[in-house]
Image (cartoon, helix red, strand yellow):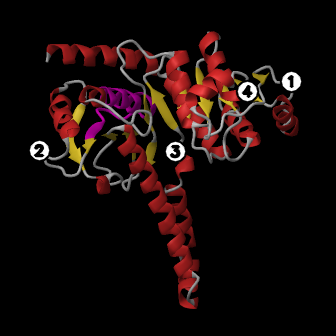
Amino acid sequence: MKTVFDTLGGDKGCANVVRGALRSLDKHDDLSVVFVGDENEINGVLKEEGRLGDSRIEVVHAPEVVTGEDRPTDAIRLKKDSSMIRSISILRTDESVNALVSTGATGTLTAAATLRIGRIRGIRRPALCPILPTMNGGIVGICDSGANVDVTPEMLLQFACLGSVYLETAFGIERPRVALLNVGTESEKGDGLRKAAYPLLKEEKTINFVGNMESRDLLSGKYDLIVCDGFSGNVLAKSTEGAAMLLLKRIKSDIMKKTTYKVGAMFLKKMFMEEKEFMNYQNYGGSVLLGCEKIIVKGHGSSNEKAVEVCSEQAYRMYKNGLLDKVSERAESCLASEEEK
């Protein structure tokens, strides 16, 4: 397998991406990588790591950066030598390349992938699906989390199909429990979009739909996949991550206020560290862009080495387990179900 890494555009710089990818490379003898970005900077990191001349590593010079301030259409048209657009081009034209990992601008990556890589036949819109931890030690996916702000009921049905096969393939979850994000659990709740999507999801035999979910139950462990439009999903994911981080900061601040709290915290230090790691989104990889003809993993902008490694591992598992073929099969099944209705 060969994965291309867009090394620019992330908050922590090129070195984090390169080192994270190398950690994944060391785990798999059948993995090779292509680093796209500033050649001098990439080679500098490789030299520090003693990996210059490694036969499984290629470097492509593309020093221009796509930022979050760039309009996606402008970046695609005007920044052809940027690391992101060059990475997309390599993924499209080089048949030996199977996947892309990027920590760059989400909007441009999504637009470029959709336009240049293309969708799997039958898929109306690709969707982003990040993973979060649940209180029972499991995981939950959110599909969509930002790729599509305006959606139709039929698109929500496809997101459920895409997310289900992703969780089955990449994480080994059998018959993932699918829920529709809503303002209440009752079937009649919600706006027109949610009311129209509910019966479609309920009647679809290829997914395990369990009903509506209120946002407060996201991390409860009752669900494996949450289906929603990209606007709601993005707000849900970021507000949950933010609340978790702020709660940990509040606990730390309170502990420092009193000596008795500090003494007690000394005995609970290991537990606090475990909880911090449990809620650290860096440990759960990136958002997979489901529905494209190649595997694309969008890492968080602030991804560290560990997060990039996990993103690479996600891509590796999906390729090895035949995600794209399974998504294509599920899409055909979903479309057939829609036509029957």
Give the mark nearest the N terminus, 4 or 3: 4
Asked where in the image residue 39 lies, by quadrant, the reply is top right
Q: Is residue 15 left or right of residue 75?
A: right
Asked if the residues shown at circle 1 and circle 3 are in contact, with their CB atoms under 8 angstroms apart, the answer is no
Q: Earlier in the sequence, mark 1 or mark 2?
A: 1
Q: Position of residue 78 (x, y in %)?
A: 67, 23
Which image quarter is the C terminus in? top left
Question: Relative to 57, is 227 on the left or the right?
Answer: left
- Residue 217 location, quadrant: bottom left
| Magenta region includes residue 282 | no
For mark 2, give the secondary structure. Answer: loop
Q: Tell me whether circle 4 and circle 3 mark residues in contact (CB < 8 Å).
A: no
On the image, numbered disc 4 is attached to which residue?
36
User: Residue at label 3?
Assistant: 284
- Between the residue at mark 1 and the residue at mark 4, the CA separation in whole angstroms equals 16 Å
145 lies left or right of 202: right
Q: Mark 3 or 2 closer to N-term? A: 2
Q: Is residue 255 left or right of residue 230?
A: right
* Span of residues in magenta: 158-179
Amino acid type assigned to the residue bearing label 2 in the image: Glu
Is 2 located above or below residue 171 in the figure? above
Q: Gap between marks 4 and 2, in whole Å?
A: 50 Å
Which residue lies under the disc numbered 1?
A: 53
Q: Amino acid at mark 4?
A: Val
Secondary structure of residue under mark 4: strand
Residue 35 visible in this rendered orientation of the protein: yes
Residue receiving disc 2: 188
Residue 265: x and y in percent read 55, 79
